[in-house]
Amino acid sequence: MSDRLEITFAPLNADPETVTVVFAGDGLALGTRAREFDTKSASALSKAAAAADFKGKYKSSIEILAPAKIGVDRLILSGIGKISTLTEQQAVELGGAVLAAIQGRKSNEASVIVDVEGSETLSADEIAALIAQGAMLRHYNFKKYLTKKSNDEGQEKDGLKKLTIQVPHPDKAKAAFQPLKAVANGVNFARDLVNEPANILGPVELAEKTKALEKLGVDVEILDVKDMEKLGMGSLLAVGQGSERQSRLAVMVWNGAKGNKKQKPICFVGKGVVFDTGGISIKPAAGMEDMKGDMGGAAAVIGTMHALAERKANVNAVGLIGCVENMPSGNATRPGDIVTSMSGQTIEVINTDAEGRLVLADVLWYAQEQFKPKLVIDLATLTGAIMVALGKEYAGLFSNEDKLADELLAASRLTGEKMWRMPLDKAFDKMMDSKNADMKNAGGRWAGAATAAAFLQRFIQKDTPWSHIDLAGTAMDGSRNDINTSWGAGWGVRLLNAFVAEYHEKGEK
Ligand code: BES
Ligand code: MN
Ligand code: ZN
């Protein structure tokens, strides 16, 4: 991760020294501390606000030349809108917007004064913690390979390093921030993985990245090619065999369920194709560099496990990622080849570019055999077709169980990571039948995202609640927003964390 942002919480009476943000509500209701500044500086704040037609609208902000008596360089008034109904997600996004306003100042340090009324459900300290999370997410950038201070793309290497947040009760804010920080760390970890180029992050390296979770109490096991051969993972191994770099399967186990150690785990399965050339069915050159992000599903799984473990989630969860590179070579799988998956089912490889499903087939099967999970969720940058259907704003959700789908959709609404439910249907399943094997790996021109899901479902055992999330449009180069300016979005980590927190922790809801 490039430049980290150090966030600390301080009491309200500490005098800020650098760029300072204070909040104003709808209709320009100045927060207590802002009012205090206003008195000190003979209404300079309200005058400046009126001159700029600033009304304290949510996410709006103005910068004010600091009146002499306040003793800070710059003052930013930031709108918090109607605070009584402020939601958690809105507070997080506000944090992102506030950070952006601060970054406009090119200062290394800043203070944010959260001296506001609480909302109906959140105290000022909790709002401050959410703002801090938003700031952490917004602050993320991927500049580790920039060797100059700035470049023509407008990238600046040095920026804000330290953010002090003044709140009524620093200890309470700090405690509220702990789990939020864990989640932001998980998101930023995932972003780093997606942004990292494939020459640095091969399948072995991607698998090794999971070892970073051991210090958080996660048990990590990495299966190599021999292990996978013994298990009969002919489908996954067929994808990686054209690459000089060996395939791996990484398994992360978090046993956090208190009281009930035997609780069946939730399994998260991720597609970890570190680079997808298409193999022998090679992709066109234009835009192929984006296929370094074809491990966005795996990144979301690692990031989620990171978040759950760091915040010591009261749940048993397992993350499994199939790490391969899809390359053409003299040893690559050919169109027409027939492979045998761990499930025993045979697959005719019609198109070597439909490789993600071949990887997932074996990892999904292994997850069910090994862990007898309560439910399975896979995440994969699986099809271009999902982007044709839903664009870069929505991921596609497929599920064989309405309850699971509804929980995921509800979590998605909470975090603003949008999903749209797509159909599983016998008709799509039929399109995957093959003359020469139990199935083929590509279903033809129509309904490409749905036929891919139908293929995956053939590796889901009866009675396993399962969801498949196709994040090809959202994992990388998706729409940028207040809390993400990065190409690798870390999409899904917050959503899956919310799914666990809301529905699978501290007893069932
Ligand atoms: N990794 C791609 C899907 C993808 C494309 C993700 C663009 C992100 C951006 C996947 O492996 C793939 O190539 N899918 C094919 C399947 C087809 C050959 C049946 C596709 O969608 O074209
Ligand atoms: Mn492909
Ligand atoms: Zn792919």
Image (spheres, rainbow, N blue to C red):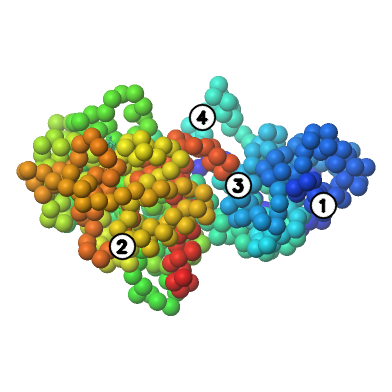
Q: Helix, strand or loop at disc 3?
A: helix
Q: Residues within 10 Å of mark 3 (few under 14, many from 20)?
A: many
Q: Is residue 341 above or below residue 317?
A: above
Task: Look at the image and tell me whether residue 329 can be seen.
Answer: yes
Disc marking residue 33? 1
Q: Residue at x 32, y 55 (%)?
A: 399
Q: Is residue 286 left or right of residue 507?
A: left
Q: Amino acid at mark 4?
A: Leu
Q: Rounded to the nearest whole Å, what is the CA distance between mark 1 and mark 4? A: 40 Å
Task: Look at the image and tell me whether residue 362 can be seen.
Answer: no
Q: Would you say the residues marked 1 and 3 are in contact, meaning their CB atoms lie under 8 Å apart?
A: no
Q: Which of marks 2 and 1 precedes in the sequence?
A: 1
Q: Is residue 500 above or below residue 236?
A: below
Camera-nearest residue between 306 and 42: 42
Disc marking residue 465? 2
Q: Position of residue 223 (x, y in %)?
A: 25, 54
Q: Residue at x 56, y 43 (%)?
A: 483
Spot the residue most to the top.
152
Q: Rounded to the nearest whole Å, what is the CA distance between mark 4 and mark 2? A: 45 Å
Q: Would you say the residues marked 3 and 2 are in contact, meaning their CB atoms lie under 8 Å apart?
A: no
Q: Amino acid at mark 2?
A: Pro
Q: Which label lies toward us, 3 or 2?
A: 2
Disc marking residue 146? 4
Q: Which label lies toward us, 1 or 3?
A: 3
Q: Which of marks 4 and 1 precedes in the sequence?
A: 1
Q: Helix, strand or loop at disc 1?
A: helix
Q: Which label lies toward us, 4 or 2?
A: 2
Disc marking residue 498? none
Q: Amino acid at mark 3?
A: Glu
Q: Position of residue 10 (x, y in %)?
A: 73, 56
Spot the residue most to the right.
42
